[in-house]
Amino acid sequence: MAKMVYMALPFLAQPHKTSKASSSSPSSSKPSKLQHRTRSTNISVPSSTNVAANRSLKPQKLNSDVSPHRAVSAVRLMRIELGGAFAGLLNEKGKGSGENEMGYVQRTLGFRTRELNNQDLRLVTEIVGGTIRWRRYLDHLISSLCHDKDISSMEPLLLQILRIGFYEILKLDMPPYAVVDENVQLAKAALRPGAGNLVNGILRTLVLLKENETLPLPKVEGDDRSQARALATLYSHPVWIVRRWTKYLGQEETIKLMIWNNSEPSYSLRANRAIGFSRDDLVAQLNALKVPHKLSLHLDDFVRIKTGLQTIIHAGLLKEGLCSVQDESAGLIVSIVDPQPGETIVDCCAAPGGKTLYMASHLSGQGMVYAIDVNSGRLRILKETAKLHQVDGVVTTIHADLRTLTDGEPLKSNKVLLDAPCSGLGVLSKRADLRWNRNLEDMEELKKLQDELLDAASTLVKPGGVLVYSTCSIDPEENDERVAAFLLRHHDFHIDPVDRYVPPDFVTPNGFYFSNPVKHSLDGSFAARLVRAL
């Protein structure tokens, strides 16, 4: 499932739980709960490799003509598209140091620029995330201005430079001709003079088309398929997602959801009550750092921020375990589990551990959360972060595939959380790259996996105990339909409505929890509370 949980500093390297290694595959080590499938591409990888290799033979030197944020952005985008890196890992605000970033630029492009300052790092975050979000839209325009050339055959680095330039001109408030000149310099330095001339001509044409309001964009007309293709281009989402959402939500709500996904995401901070650090303490720290914030309307431990995460990181609040970056939708799911001191709770697919640690913080040092996951590396990080948050005394990690763990005499508990592998379609505003790394075939594989894990998790529940099934998907086939199918297979379970645990605005007619990104300004997520008969 796609859990956008960023823990204290070690966890900033862990993408959302959609991007967690699947509990279905012990051999999986990719940060995807569904075994990561590298999408095929016709982009000329050898061309890029040869460029990097040739550059590395030249003396390393400082190039003061190239803006550092564009050089870093281009290299990051190459790593994401060709190297299988995750945008959440590379693009998390404040994650990479300027020195590390410049090292990648030097190894890839053969030169260094001036060092990155904080403003440069913020621009890198904006440009990389925005370019990935708007990729389909940008590629349509690049192809149109290249006379409908198949841009998949374009040199990878050249394509990234064009995407950056198009994004800066169309979506950022930057002087257009300064953008042209800067990206021309990058193309000339990183590739060759002819590439700079090509970038110059294409970007200048784009500036004129934008000024004259004559961008070659599709119209939403024709049959359903034609309209879906046009909307997919205009709002930069895969066609299959647009068609699926239109089927379930209607076109108007689908457009609103795509607009939300393309907007700059906001984040929530959770104060670590386990060490006696309250939300009031967190607010005092944010005021001292001059970071704008709002109190959560739903949870006492949470504060929302739109900007300033890099400031918070540099101040050491995360590294010291005083707070975590965690969406309120995840906190509301923990409210549905309702952890109490002295209880034993099993978290079936625990890593990266956001819900695990929040549940542990409710135990006041009494009880235990058993954190099960197939990925030993992520469990190790979870264990380290539990120590940082001072809840390691009530967290026990178990490295296992949930389905084989339950073959023998399984651990039995009164409360079990299955935060299941899912498509992550509720967190596309934060996981900019996820929309391009999912396809329709994934949905069928995921539903099968969800059913298997639900069956396995149910064996851990004592008579009279509670099983909470959750995802961060907004897709009914992963949510309501999976619960309905489970109840048909397990007549000894019934629905326990969640209205006692979350505000009524989040309760569905079936008694489930559901957060709507557009309606609630949170990640999209789902949870069902199921009780086993005595």
Image: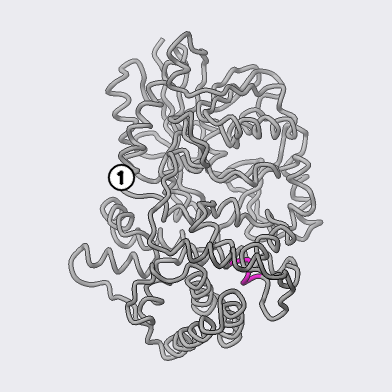
In the image, residue 475 above or below residue 189:
above
Residue 71 is covered by the magenta coloring = yes
In this view of the protein, which residue sits in the foreground, 390 or 378? Answer: 378
In the image, residue 294 above or below residue 19:
below
x 59%, y 29%: residue: 376
Q: Position of residue 313 (x, y in %)?
A: 74, 52
Disc 1 target residue: 441
Q: Position of residue 135 (x, y in %)?
A: 44, 66
In the image, residue 256 above or below residue 27:
below
Q: Residues within 10 Å of mark 1 (few under 14, many from 20)?
A: few
Describe residue 468's horizontal placement relative to residue 10 as left or right. Answer: left
Q: In the picture, residue 379 is in which quadrant? A: top right
Describe residue 497's horizontal placement relative to residue 30 as left or right. Answer: left
Q: Position of residue 154 (x, y in %)?
A: 42, 71
Q: Position of residue 216 (x, y in %)?
A: 34, 81
Residue 494 is covered by the magenta coloring = no
Residue stretch in magenta: 69-73
Q: In the picture, residue 383 is in which quadrant? A: top right
In the image, residue 471 above or below residue 122:
above
Is residue 504 in sight in this rendering? no
x 60%, y 57%: residue: 91
x 45%, y 52%: residue: 434
Describe residue 236's horizontal placement relative to residue 10 as left or right. Answer: left
Q: In the picture, residue 264 is in which quadrant? A: bottom right
Question: Which quarter of the image is occupied by the C terminus?
Answer: top left
In the image as oriented, which residue stretches furthest toward the right?
A: 288
Q: Which amino acid, mark 1?
A: Glu
Colour mapping used in the image: one colour
